[in-house]
Amino acid sequence: MSTTAAPLALERGESPGRRALRRFLKHRLAVFGLAVVLVFVLVAVLAPWVATADPLATSWTAIRKAPSAAHWFGTDENGRDVFSRVVWGARASLLAGVVSVLAAVAIGVPIGLLAGLAGGWTDTIISRIADAMLSVPFLILAIALAAFLGPALENAMLAIAITASPVFVRLARGMALDAKSTDWVEAARALGNPPWRLGLLHVLPNIVPPLLVQATLAIAEAIIAEASLSFLGLGQQPPDPSWGSMLNSAQRFLTQAPWLAIFPGLAIFLVVLAFNLVGDGLRDALDPRSERR
Amino acid sequence: MWIWLLRRMGQILPTLLILSILIFGLQQLMPGDPALILAGEERGDPQVLAQIRAELFLDRPLWQQYLHWLGNVLQGDFGFSWRIRMPVSELILEKLPVTFQLATMAFIIALLIGVPAGILSAVWRDRPVDWVTNAVALFGISTPNFWLGIMMILLFSVQLGWLPPSGYVPLTEDPVQSLATTIMPAFVLGNGIAGVLMRHTRAAMLTALSQDYVRTARAKGLPERVVVTKHALRNALIPVVTLGTIEFGRLLAGAVLTEQIFTIPGFGKLIVDAVFNRDYPVVQGVVLATALIFVTLSLVADLLYMTINPRLRAA
């Protein structure tokens, strides 16, 4: 990466990081996506202050009321305020998305680096395990793992983390193999650096750009996966709010209370769209070959 | 080509072997003792428990349990459902045609939308057409399947009353009713894949349009329509066909939630019901079956790639 980026950066007199930032900011949709992500993060962090009501407080006098000034998104079948539940649901969704992807990176990258740098049997075994896991579609593997682990938000996150990790294994392995064939890593090895030092100092910094892109897109996928698992009752357990489980119970009241189905879904759609926009923008900004795009 | 195929099989076999270990390993994550669950009312009787353990090899060391399980799987025995009291393989074979119909319809919808959209956006690159198709593709990719399904039921079934909200009629029984019950779920499933196919087609077309042979064709004075359809598209479709085959496998995963929402008794509903009923052998069997289908499809994708790309056939 930086081998091709360095001459360009020298010509323009700017560092690769600064150049990527400039290109990212020029990408209007990506900046919009980033803004939406930040709004959702703020809402999740400040949920107790943003929510207009207690998300768990039931009220028998306000069952399935349409959106109004008192309840912006209406109320659900137990008289709970849907807006407050969507706000608190952002916590579960973002937490699940970000934490499970961070865990997947933490599992996948070291294993991938090991495979790429060590080579031989270690590489063969690790690569075959990654292949095997990738041959089961993402959601089916996540459902199966969550089902066997038992229904809970933590287990859903663990299931998503494990399912998402082989992608990062492949990425890190590929980058390690690329780096291994370069002259500067060859030189570093000739100087007697041990493999872990090569991985840490020479390969890891080059992985950061593609890793950032992959991780952002993986968060979008993880948020959908968490919503899907919660929809199936395998994620956040009631009465705690999560967008997926809200959609599940909304299904029973489509004719009487359609707003129950609209708002949580809209929240998932917006946050996933935002992460996808940021991911696409990062890819264009960090890829030195796509200068003319 | 045969040598290549053999080499490819040599790669797949270890993958399948590891996959079988992983899927067998799922069982070990299971909370509680399966013998206790299976014994039901008679869980207090140690003799019954011992008999169940002996039948299921649960009293043997783990590696023997695995070999026993693997031997059964190789003979097509995927275990026995705890709830429905039927062999898992029979359950899967019974549900698979339903999902296959759904996935095929979804795939056709995705192709009809994704490929033309990708061509248009590549030909009119950086023009309004390109922006709109890209935006639509991104929306398609970002919309959760199950939410789109619920919204479509809300619009077409609840508000307009045009289509049945749920249920399934087999194609052989009443083709018209069958299409009416599956068109919405097929569209929902196809929607996400259409976005992916559009992006693949656009990228492949852009590459093809920048090749020398396209410049030559243009220089010869051929009409642009001929250049695009005859010269560029034919070459661009090669990666699209192979990637499309793999996307078809992903439809199986998408079917899980879609079938749940539209209550279609297919493969996806089978695994969800099994999860709800804690019917672990069925969950395990479905994961195994999907993996087998997926591996087969990627092999088919490679073969297709070889067949339509003559340059690779000689190698």
Image (spheres, coloured by chain):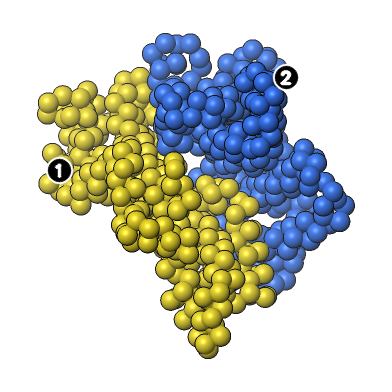
Chain colours: A yellow, B blue
Residue A74 seen anywhere in this rendered image of the structure: yes
Residue situated in front as seen by the camera: A197 or B82: A197
Which mark is in front, 1 or 2?
1
Identify the residue at horizontal 70%, vertical 53% (top origin).
Answer: B79
x then y, percent, for residue A129 = 62, 64
* Residue A126 in the figure: left or right of residue A280: right
Q: Does residue A241 appear in the picture of this structure? A: no
Coordinates of residue B22 in the picture (x, y in percent): 62, 62
Q: Chain of mark 1?
A: A
Q: Give the residue at x 12% y 26%.
A: A69
In the picture of the structure, the residue carrying the numbered disc 2 is B172
Q: Residues within 10 Å of mark 1 (few under 14, many from 20)?
A: some
- Residues indicated by labels 1 and 2 sit on the same polypeptide chain: no
Which one is nearer the viewer's eye here, A62 or B17?
B17
Question: What residue lies at 50% left-to-right and 14% top-to-bottom?
Answer: B163
Please state if A142 lies on the left or on the right of A130 as rendered: left
**Above/below status of A223 relative to A191:** above
Q: Residues within 10 Å of mark 2 (few under 14, many from 20)?
A: few
Q: Where is residue A235 drawn, in percent x and y?
A: 40, 49
Q: Is residue B30 above or below residue B214?
A: below
Q: Amino acid at mark 1?
A: Val
Q: Position of residue A88 (x, y in %)?
A: 24, 45
B92, B117: nearer the viewer: B117
Q: Amino acid at mark 2?
A: Thr
Q: Residue at x 64, y 38 (%)?
A: B211
Residue A50 is marked as 1
On residue B148, the disc is none
